[in-house]
Image (spheres, coloured by chain):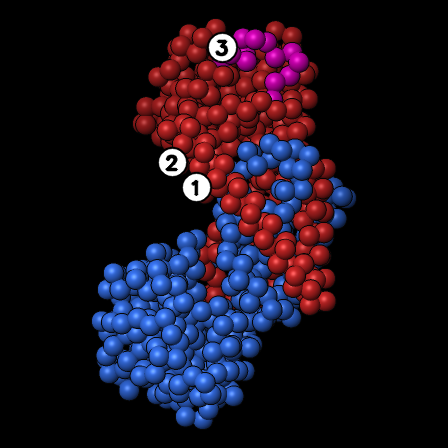
Chain colours: A blue, B red
Amino acid sequence: MKLAEARLTIVGLGLIGGSLAAGLHDRCAGLTGVDADPETLRLAQARGIVDQVDSDLRAGLAACDMAILAVPVGEILSILGRLGADLPTPRFVLDVGSTKSAIVSAMRDLPAEIEPMGGHPLCGKEASGLSAAEPDLFRDKAFVLTPLERSSDGVRLLAGEIIGAVGGRPFLLEAAAHDRILAATSHLPYLLAVTLVSSVAEIAASDPSAWDLTASGFRDSSRLAGSDIRMMMDILSTNATEIRKSIHIARDILEQLETALDKGDLTAIESRMRRARNYMEELRARQTAHTARSA
Amino acid sequence: MKLAEARLTIVGLGLIGGSLAAGLHDRCAGLTGVDADPETLRLAQARGIVDQVDSDLRAGLAACDMAILAVPVGEILSILGRLGADLPTPRFVLDVGSTKSAIVSAMRDLPAEIEPMGGHPLCGKEASGLSAAEPDLFRDKAFVLTPLERSSDGVRLLAGEIIGAVGGRPFLLEAAAHDRILAATSHLPYLLAVTLVSSVAEIAASDPSAWDLTASGFRDSSRLAGSDIRMMMDILSTNATEIRKSIHIARDILEQLETALDKGDLTAIESRMRRARNYMEELRARQTAHTARSA
């Protein structure tokens, strides 16, 4: 089935679901938006990014070819457990949740007639919710797909077409590798931001002006501490093992830095700093190359 | 002496020194720029933000009323040690270095005829160097002053007038409190960024695609790891004690998070996350209030 022939239902019209709706609504045979929040449904209709809306999950899934699950991981798991039971049986199911092992594992148990695919577009931004959604959110960003053995050619093609339609870069990965890597590149940055804010709070307990002396460096480094708690709790609970390993690596590095400062071994610290700066420069060069290729 | 009557010499035309020159050159009786880099001197003249330039520190300081030292902390300390010896004796000296205890301590030993003042404008940005300098860099930003007992009314007034001329918010603080607070709000974020990049590098050693799976959250959280190494080394070596304490606080918090994950105690983690998010919201409200007051 081609995207142009497919009726899509997007469950959850937040930043990701709303942006998918904005990018896909005129590329498919019909797009239904499902969200628990009536105001979000009104806004989606006002922006013209959905053909119809439904506050009821069962009704919204009733007549679609593909369900795109764009809610927090815990809710995705709950919906997967109900498909084909008290919820309808869409032919294709794609999720865009932030962790993949638990979801892919739940997808293995779906009724045989469902063709599932795990996905995760890497494109968060500071603002969340439908009001921040935009069709270009995925442009030139990695859109991870974690196919299952049972994922059909049909769902692979359709997922690829969706990524192409929103301008993303498809990135195939095992669910376990996704979770191992994202523990370091995404979940650890969040916990370090929480750690930074908590550390400044400890200093501010005796020096209240600490909060007044935060500048742009602190602002960027702490931004993720403002992330949605529900979403982050679902990530922590479904990727606890890998996140623990990442925290442990970070603690080891901080301990090395503290020990080197203790011993006045500035050379060791400088060498660590230079390596980090070199990685940053390589990464920037790599990202510039990506952008140049896609321009 | 009023700013309009003062001849200023700014030593170091990087981001901060260059921005001060851009904001002050038409508010004072004459502005000399000193920098070791001939290309920087040429650019400063081309931009018209200095009346004259000098690559020689002694010549540049010869006929000024106030020297503004805008070089890395180590170089500021070296210059302070030479004023009145093999360097001239400007009447007023203001520095804008990133740590204050070592500098204020060196200022105590200046020849008696010099009127010194410690300063630190909190306004870094991603880019550095004169090409990134702009007169509005300091607008609505905290500009810390750490006066010494020996700081005269004259230098206090002049420093205040300079901050007013560039639109900053003067913030009086003891040097020790500055260093204690900035260890948490500025130096720790840098080290956490280095830690994050180093952690991803460890994961990338076995999963090379890790670098491809970094998104905007990682980019913001890691940005400071690209900071100038020389500047950061000077900060680390002149604020080692307070920075060690900050690292230790951060390590404790990470250990609590790891232990809670180990024990599956998600409630403890969620409570830590909520507190951090609340601090972020309070800080944002406070900063919005600042901006509203100054509008």
Q: Residue at x 57, y 37 (%)?
A: A211
Q: Which residues are magenta?
A: B146-158
- Indicate which disc residue B214 carries: none
Q: Amino acid at mark 2?
A: Ser
Q: CA distance from mark 2 to mark 1?
A: 8 Å
| Front-lying residue, A263 or B146 | B146
Q: Is label 3 in a helix, a strand or a loop?
A: loop
Q: Which residue is mark 3?
A: B65
Q: Is label 2 in a helix, a strand or a loop?
A: helix
Q: Quadrant of the C terminus of chain A?
A: bottom left
Q: Residue at x 45, y 85 (%)?
A: A86
Q: Which residue is mark 1?
A: B127
Q: Is residue A64 above or below residue A284?
A: below
Residue A226, x across and y down, in percent: 51, 52
Left/right of residue A278 with respect to residue A21 in the rendered view: right
Q: Is residue A26 above or below residue A14?
A: below
Q: Amino acid at mark 1?
A: Ala
Asked if residue B285 lies in the magenta stretch, the reply is no
| Residue A17 occupies quadrant | bottom left
Q: Chain of mark 1?
A: B
